[in-house]
Image (cartoon, rainbow, N blue to C red):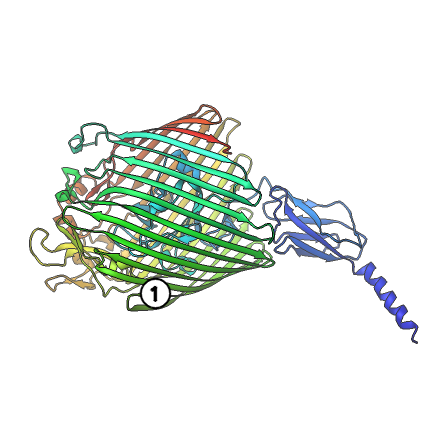
Amino acid sequence: MTFKLPILIFFLCCLGNVFGQTFTGKVIDAVSKEPLIGANIVNSNGQGTTTDVNGLFSFSKLENFEVFAISFIGYETLTTDTIAINKSQTEPAVFELIPSASSLGEIVISAGKFEQRLEEVTMSLDILKPSLIEDKNQVRLENTLQQAPGVNVTDGQANIRGGSGWSFGTGTRVQTLVDGIPLISGDAGQALWDLVPIQSLDRVEVLKGASSVLYGSAAMNGVIHAITHPFPEKFSLNVNLYSGWYDTPKRNYLKWWDGPQLNSGINFDLQQIINPNNAFVLSAGYISDDGFRYLEEGTLTRMFGKYLHKSKRIKGLEASLSSTVNYADHGDALMWESDSFAYIPGDSAITRTYGWDFYIDPNISYRHGHFKHNVMGRYLQLNNNAKSSEADYTNASEQFFLQYLLQYYYTSKLVVTAGYSTTHTTSNSIVFVGRHQASNNAGFLQADYKPLEWINLNAGVRLEEYTLDDRYQKEPVFRGGVNVQIIKGTNARFSYGEAFRFPAISETFTTTSFGAISVFPNEGLNPESGNSIELGLRQMFYSKKIKGYIDFSVFQMHYYDMIEFTFGSWGKVVPPGYGLGFKPLNVGETKIKGFEVATALEGKVNSKLAYRLLAGYTYTLPQVLYPDSAFAQDQNGNDLTYTLSSSDTSNRILKYRYQDLFKVDLQINYSQWHGGFSMRYNDFMQNIDRLFNDRIAGVKKNRQRNYNGDFVLDVRLGYQINKKWQVDFLVNNVLNEEFMIRPGYLGEPRSYTFKINYSIGKS
């Protein structure tokens, strides 16, 4: 009996070699050689599996020869020849998939903080490419955003789908990010557009709807995510030199200047790979603008650098260090003198601001197995020496930001994102009446689950706490969404998101004046909260001749205790201002609903003719729910309601909102010639503060004259001399239409620009 046991063991081992041989393979992208996560593999016996986070899969084989069918969205299906099963296999067999000509969509990261296909996200998301910036010779991101469907930037304040209107000094409801890190001033809660390195952008992703779970309280209305160049594949250099001037306004007597008012600049972007593990990006720009408003001339110098490193010793470890530094010197006016002197500041109240601002961002990421760890930080310092002839607005602040992000990838079907972030701001300002400290701490968790190839689900929660001096608030927010593929290329989605925003230092403490207009503090201001829902349908196109999408969505945003700076009588009734000014107030419960149609297409008609199109129409119905409910009292103790404080109460439309936004940008390239146009239309701003309309010189008169809304048309034409040199001529506001950026602040007249571009290594 004893001799039978070794024989039995030997027999079982032989069976194991015959029947239990494990075959291991690896699936990679044929171009980038990167592993493909979640690829589907089916063998000739009908057995199926998917690749893991390293692109690996395995089968226990019953035969000595096998055939595999390997597929992945966006790639040609690979059917292998008969493969001999090597019993002594020590390395995985490698299979390369070729990207498909019918691959759908772009890869985006803002929706879930990881790479996803555009058509699979559960919220509206648009992509602005650097070609739009180059075509229009944009030097500030907020100008580029004016062409984004559903987005409006009013005097530096961004809003998406009417989520906010112009409200002097109110903190933003749209989170602005650079490479995943918030670029919002800790004291004023405003986007720092001048610190965005626009020359080095790879793309801008615009996420619409409440996104507070992943991005915090400033993301009530959405996210604008500026993403700089990734690790470069080769050397490239792009240099841009331009110069232009402002034309005489439509009402020629508004022209206050005699000689030419110039607007010129130079910028460059350099990408250099040192070796396969080290590279850097460097860009800089200088802008000089004489201005079309009296005394608002200014200059801006901006420098950006990013160093990237991939570890040779530790696979999956990457690090980067980036920084933007700028020096600005410019003038700003809050209000015009009158409609007849629209480019002259009221009471000559110009605020002159100069100073250095900068940030430094260290970033470390490590991916191993199913896990990815990411630690990112930011040190931001703002130094603004701001003074007028009557007042000192000097302010300085510093902000520390740190975030740890942990992501778990269970193939491509489940991604779990968890993280913790902390922000601390110290502000010292005359305007904010001394020194203040604000801190924000948050923990968040979101899961993205794809149980089947045609459905994507996500849900998340965030717990956020905010401290301003001795005030403390803690609030949870939730979100969820679903995306369903109806047929290949057609996806429907639903999204629900909650939001919470604590008042900024500026909203709570600002005490100052601009000429005869004052700004009053409100230390009893309550936080905002709300939610947004959306239903959407996206049709993708991707062929040799056309790629892009057409998107339709309906949406609703519901806000409680919405904060707006309201113009009224808040101080002593004495000259020169008679107590008039702005004060931040909780104006009550509001609801904004509407729909949007957007498209982004590009393609080729033939070998010489190509085009790019970005267009969208957005309709919103922004309303206050309780128009006769008192939300404040003026200096005389009189109740203030929406009805009593509005210039037009019909349909209960919120103040400083547009209901119709229509935008088109078309670029056409033919052989060495290229040209295009941009068009923007918004309807008449129906409702503003009643006292603002009645008391500020010329506001009512201008609104009565320009009651049809604003139509702005820009055109451009260029010629590619050779592979390195290009020249362009641009005309902005070609019809020289008169439009108000906001009441009491007239937009620019027609302007002309010549541009020369030199590039090496640009694809």
- Residue labelled with disc 1: 466
| Residues packed near mark 1 inside 10 Å, few (<14), some (14 to 19) or many (20 plus) | many
Q: Nearer the viewer, residue 362 or 661?
A: 362
Q: Which of 82 and 367 is in front in this view?
A: 367
Secondary structure beneath label 1? strand
Q: In this view, does 148 lie above or below 366?
A: above
The residue sitting at 73% across, 57% down in the picture is 59
Q: In this view, does 252 lie above or below 53?
A: above
Residue 719: name its quadrant: top left
The residue sitting at 63% across, 56% down in the picture is 52
Q: Nearer the viewer, residue 417 or 618?
A: 417
Residue 292: name its quadrant: top left
Q: Which of 481 and 409 is in front in this view?
A: 409
Q: In which quarter of the image is the N terminus?
A: bottom right
Apparent side of residue 424 relative to residue 4 in the rendered image (left or right): left
Q: Do we see residue 577 in this rendering?
A: yes
Disc 1 marks which amino acid?
Tyr
Q: Which residue lies furthest to the left in this view?
A: 574
Residue 296, x across and y down, in percent: 22, 39
Q: Do we see residue 586 in this rendering?
A: no
Apparent side of residue 87 relative to residue 276 in the rendered image (left or right): right
Residue 416, x across and y down, in percent: 53, 61
Residue 658, x across and y down, in percent: 28, 47
Residue 77, x across and y down, in percent: 65, 45
